[in-house]
Amino acid sequence: MTQTSRFRPRHSPLGRAVASLTAAAMLAACVNTQAGRIGADDGSDACRTQVVALDSTGDFYGESIIRGAAIGAASGALLGGLIAAASGRGRDVMAGAAIGALAGGAIGGATGYYGARQQQASDQASLNLAIAGDLATENASLDRTQIAFNQLMDCRFATAQRTRENLKAGRITRPQAEAQMTDVRARTQRDIQVAQTINTSIGRRGAEFDTAIENVAPGVKEQTLARNRGGAFVPVRARATVPLRLRPDAISPEIAQVSAQQNVTLRPGSNGFALVETSSGLRGYAPAGAFPEARNLGSRPAVAADEGDVRSLAASNVARRDNFAESVGNAERLAAGQGFELAS
């Protein structure tokens, strides 16, 4: 009696690891769509255009500047898997690949860009020129992202302000106002999640630039951050009710009010505004003239103009990244706290 043989293909641990990594990457690619990030358009969002605009700017940051991080992560995953497989510890292949991917991504991201530019450059002048060009491109994209985020937040907080005004004028009932405010707060929190994801990608690319910046313009990052975050903190007591705005701009939406005799802290702002922080942590901008003490604060330095040289471009890149992260953090605090209260 002939026994039918059964053939079962045996896959190596490394093969299974590579297959698993490939499947995970394909799954991530499938779900990483705009609809997956911001949801489908059901026609109910008055700020949908601004949401799409912000999300679309994030595509730029999804790629490594010159594929340094991607190459590092891929080679790190392969190397980690190979080491585990070669050692005979098949169960450790996936762990080795994952650790290798993280280590490879970190090395590739931090040094891959600068190393690649070094290899391509014939001398220091051409290296500086190449990095300056990359920084100029990055800065233009950061400007687009900042503008898109500002416009989206303006739309959200203006919607909240209209709800307050409609309630005050009796055009809607309080339950209707509360429902509207709950909705706009929830939408804003989703917007901020999108912005945080973009900010994470900006930070990842920023780490690549930081390595290059420290090599071609030593000390620029520390000096820029010190200027950007510096300035006096002045505790004051408001003499009258003062409206706080989302940004240092007279047409920016009102987000709250400081009451007469309320204790607040002033920090340098820009455009003739002071940054005001309440004891609860709420931050907004008010005309510096509303607080006599603000005249001694000075003004927050404007983002350095891109003059074309690598040092100027590096400084403005650091400032732009810091400003975007700060604006996202401030919006997050507002969405979690008093920014959408009916009594504001």
Image: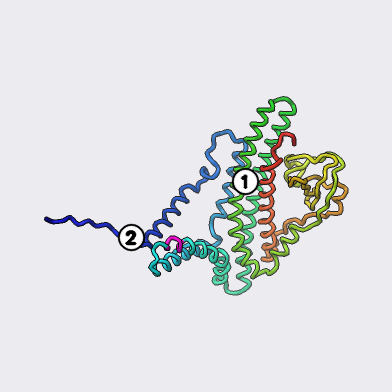
x and y percentages locating residue 300 in the rendered image = 78, 55
The residue wearing badge 1 is 192
Check the image and report above or below for 76 versus 176.
below
Residue at position x 73%, y 44% in the image: 246
Q: Earlier in the sequence, mark 1 or mark 2?
A: 2
Residue closest to the eye, 48 or 38: 38
Q: Is residue 234 above or below residue 179?
A: below
- Residue at the spot 74% in from the left edge and 34% down from the top edge: 343
State the image quarter where residue 280 is shown.
top right
The residue singled out by tag 2 in the image is: 11
Which residue in the rendered view is the most extreme toward the bottom?
A: 123
Q: Residue at x 56, y 33 (%)?
A: 43
Q: Is residue 303 left or right of residue 104?
A: right
Quadrant for residue 107, please give it: bottom right
What segment is highlighted magenta in the picture? Answer: 92-97
Classify mark 2: residues with Cα within 10 Å, few (<14), some (14-19) or many (20+).
Answer: few
Mark 1 in CB contact with mark 2 (< 8 angstroms) = no
Residue type (three-letter) at the residue carrying disc 1: Ile
> Mark 2 is on which residue type?
His
Q: Which mark is residue 61?
A: none
| The furthest residue to the left | 1
The answer to which of 3 and 295 lies nearer the viewer is 3
Question: Where residue 269 sits: x, y (%)?
Answer: 78, 51
- Residue 200 at x, y = what percent? 59, 54
Is residue 263 left or right of 191 when viewed as pictured?
A: right
